Amino acid sequence: MREKPRLSFGQIWNMSFGFFGIQFAFGLQQANMSGIFTTLNAKQDQLPFLWLAAPLTGLIVQPIIGSMSDRTWNRFGRRRPYFFSGAILSALALFLMPYSAAVSMAVFFLAMLDASINVSMEPFRAFVADKLNVEQRTVGFVMQSFFIGAGAAIASALPFLLTALGVNDEPKPGYVASTIKYSFQIGAAVLLLSILWTVFTTTEYPPEDMAEFERKKREERGFGKWLQEITSAMRQMPQTMKHLAVVQVFTWLGLFCMWIFFNSNIQFNLLGASDPEALKSKLQLAGQVLENNPILNANQALLDQGTKWNGVCFAMYSVVCFIVAFALPKLAAMTSRKLVHIGALVCGGVALLSTCFIHDYRLLLLTMVGIGIAWASILSMPYAILSSALPAARMGVYMGIFNFFIVLPEITASLTFQPVVKYIFRNNPLYMIMFGGACMLIAAAACLLLVRDAPGHVSESAVIRGDEKEFLTPQVTAQPVPSTGLVGDEGDKKD
């Protein structure tokens, strides 16, 4: 096999820069979609279902695009045609999203955005594996982490920053705030330009044996072969992976609750906003005119303020995650990956549960420290634990299957949470956040009771080969791959 040449700092910067735009788009979506839905008069019990577009499109689009990009080679390259087309569609969806006139329109643009981002994101994973040799993998991962952290933090806080810079933001019921509109428009430009930067400054290596590449392309074509490989791998799933699946299900249920309802908790419980539709009905019964009604305008101002502060909170946990991530390998070497992950999940669970004691929305930043610690571990430790237990030849297949245990719980929650929110928790978002905290603590307990750090050693070259074949990655994050010192770490001293 041809040895990949060492890349300069600038080349690694250029090939990774697209991650900034991808995570910028995810950050805007994550921090603002619940607020947009609420502004468009969605009920709290409808929010989980409205978010269904995100995991569902990833589940459908990622395997298809990943497989297609593996079999593509033309004068534009192998992965870059997908970067380019996905960037254009994603930028269009981002630009149009805040102009949605109804909930159904916002859901359509959310589905379009997620599908388009996945067209770019999935080949990006393999692109990094295509370009970097084993010795430079850690440098590449750090560069990706920098762009991902910066993209998420800036995008999440952007509406708040625009307000601080004096952007006029007149509240109007039923219309998305101007600061959020401008943020999405800026995001469309950032996404497009950052991915195009990577497209036009980075080359790709052609297949070493074009005849062999064409032969394999013909042999591997078809949904049947892909399904056969998944079914075979599922039957032979390692015990460590089965145990970790339980941890992942409860972990991501907790995160899903936070992402959906944190914004609403700020709006309704901490700022005192009212449900827009209920308030309209009350004013109509009182015989008041709804057009340019000062009560409705003031209520919309509170809703907009809540969405902006939600973005600040999400930016905070992104920054904490970026800082903490660099300490995780050393902590794992001193103790074990399992114990580090348990501690991080406890931090996240306690942080979410503590929201019931907070009555000043500004203090929510303290809870984001715990979430940031948990998020840093969630994006690396389960994969690091799992990688040492997997056969190297099927690394990518099993990592993709592993991510089913993230996507499927999100889809299940989207389809089943409505009666829970409506009838059990009476549309109070605080209770859903606390439910999310309880799920994280259950995940920590499951990790303590079930998971063992696998004793085996896995090389980084095996992880790189796995990246080339992995067909599914979690939504709302661009690159959750533990391909640093966490992989094959000989420093795990305790079970």
Image (cartoon, rainbow, N blue to C red):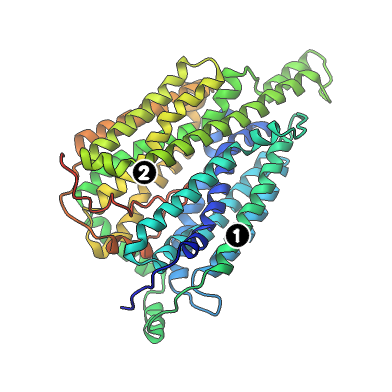
> 49 or 252, which lies in front?
252
Give the tally of numbered discs. Answer: 2
For image coordinates 41% across by 84% down, the residue present is 210
Q: Position of residue 33 (x, y in %)?
A: 60, 38
Seen in the image, is 318 located left or right of residue 228? Answer: right
For image coordinates 35% across by 31% down, the residue present is 440
Q: Amino acid at mark 2?
A: Phe
Q: Position of residue 234 (x, y in %)?
A: 27, 56
* Label 2 to label 1: alpha-carbon separation: 30 Å
* Dot placed on the residue nearer the N-terminal end, 2 or 1: 1
User: Residue 87's mark?
Assistant: 1
**Up-down relation of residue 145 to residue 303 (above or below):** below
**Up-down relation of residue 293 to residue 227 (above or below):** above
User: Residue 330's mark?
Assistant: none
Q: Amino acid at mark 1?
A: Ala
Seen in the image, is 159 located left or right of residue 62? Answer: right
Q: What residue would you read off at disc 2? A: 326
- The picture quadrant where one finds residue 392 is bottom left
For the C terminus, the image quarter is top left
Callout in the foreground (2, 1): 2
- The picture quadrant where one finds residue 44 is top right
Seen in the image, is 39 located left or right of residue 375? Answer: right
Helix, strand or loop for disc 1: helix
For the N terminus, the image quarter is bottom left
Q: Position of residue 287 (x, y in %)?
A: 82, 15
> 141 or 25, which lies in front?
141
Q: Position of residue 346 (x, y in %)?
A: 32, 29
Helix, strand or loop for disc 2: loop
